[in-house]
Image (cartoon, rainbow, N blue to C red):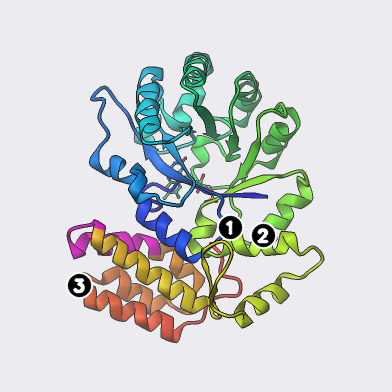
Amino acid sequence: MRYEFAPMEGITGYVYRNAHHQYYGKVDRYFTPFITPNQTKKFTSREMNDVLPEHNQGLAIVPQILTNKAEDFLWAAGKLRELGYGEINLNLGCPSGTVVTKKRGSGFLAFPVALDAFLNEVCTEMDRMGMKISVKTRVGKDSPEEWEELLEIYSRYPLSELIVHPRIQTDFYRNHPNLEAYEMAAEKLPEKIPLTYNGDLFSVKDFENLLERFPDTESVMMGRGLLTNPALAEQIDAHVSMTGRKVGQESRETREGQEKQNGHGYREFSDEKRRLREFHDALLAGYAEAIPEDRNVLFKMKELWFYFGQAFENDEKALKQIRKAVRMDVYRDAVAKIFSECELKNPPAFQ
Ligand SMILES: Cc1cc2nc3c(=O)[nH]c(=O)nc-3n(C[C@H](O)[C@H](O)[C@H](O)COP(=O)(O)O)c2cc1C
């Protein structure tokens, strides 16, 4: 099974990816939040910092691009090739209004003829550049009935991966993933294009349900589930590789395990809460180094607590203190309170 960390704009930048990779294992590839190339032919400093090789040492990274212009895509791909990247992911999933009105992200899905022409030009040129292109897509803009035609278009190109988030644009993140649409991809996509499932995998149980319906699944991408429980890929992988074992047994063994450096380079911790605490502290230190003002560092950390907060029992009061904190010492006190007073849910999962 291949595990991929979903791109999450504003969250899974290089600071987050490095800290996650240091403390947690089993994620095979991290996708960057989208880069938006335009006529200026210049990455913003945020975009550049996120993909610089020195900020991504030892991590498998796939940069993601959001555009509907072949020329801009190819310019950005060329720049990324100079930085050492061999594969680029195209964002055809972003549901945000400002993106969609510009016919980008999932907005591009409403224009299948233009999308086909875009892919034709980009795939030909990427091949000439010796680069791979993968696509992350929703299953339609306004209706899942658009999916069959979109799937036919994707099937014609040598994509290195098709990641399907089976919602339509107007769902945003509401409703449930449309598994009938995903099934169509599993059945119809040519074997030469590896298929990855993405959407609402928040627990080992969710993963089991996916495998029950799609036993041939070879690759999954997770976002909110990993943000809430950064050990989720490890837990799923342990469950997959020890067939017949119950999940509860594994988590007990993880707790009893010694803190040590393992073969993957990440540390195994005797206590999950302690590992989460160290991960949190590494994130805070990483942001403090990368971002000038405490206020902005706190803004980043508060965004993360939207997810971390769901991992603990009875943490509402301390969470409120975190949300209100405008000073670093107040923030640190609130974090200390959560870690000392609240238990991790078993299992912690995005709600
Ligand atoms: C805050 C946030 C930021 C996101 N940013 C991106 C992005 O930059 N590129 C992208 O393709 N998808 C983005 N997504 C979508 C996720 O990558 C993913 O497809 C979605 O969260 C569904 O997966 P999940 O249920 O495992 O979270 C974002 C989602 C959220 C909630």
Residue holding disc 3: 327
Residue 102 in view of the camera:
no
Nearer the camera: disc 3 or disc 2: 2
Does the magenta segment cover residue 300?
yes
Identify the residue at horizontal 54%, vertical 80% (top origin). Answer: 271
Q: In this view, does 191 lie above or below 228?
A: above
Residue holding disc 2: 237
- When asked about the image quadrant of residue 225, the answer is bottom right
Residue holding disc 1: 26
Of residues 226 and 179, the one drawn nearer to the viewer in this rendering:
226
Q: What residue type is labelled 3?
A: Arg
Q: Is residue 252 left or right of residue 30?
A: right
Whole-number angstrom distance, CA of label 1 to CA of label 2? 7 Å
Q: Is residue 20 above or below residue 96?
A: below
Of marks 1 and 2, which one's residue comes earlier in the chain?
1
Specify start and end residues of the magenta stretch as a single range: 290-304
- Rendering coords of residue 290 (x, y %): 25, 57
Q: Which amino acid does label 2 sit on?
A: Asp
Q: Which amino acid does label 1 sit on?
A: Lys
The reply to whether the C-beta atoms of the residues labelled 1 and 2 are less than 8 Å apart is yes
Identify the residue at horizontal 78%, vertical 47% (top origin). Answer: 215
- When asked about the image quadrant of residue 41, the answer is top left
Look at the numbered disc 1 and give the secondary structure of its residue. loop
Whole-number angstrom distance, CA of label 1 to CA of label 3? 35 Å
Q: In this view, does 67 lie to the left or right of 296?
A: right
- Rendering coords of residue 281 (x, y %): 36, 71
Few, some or many C-alpha atoms within 10 Å of disc 2 (few <14, some 14-19, many ≥20)? some
Few, some or many C-alpha atoms within 10 Å of disc 1 (few <14, some 14-19, many ≥20)? many
Q: Is residue 43 left or right of residue 142?
A: left
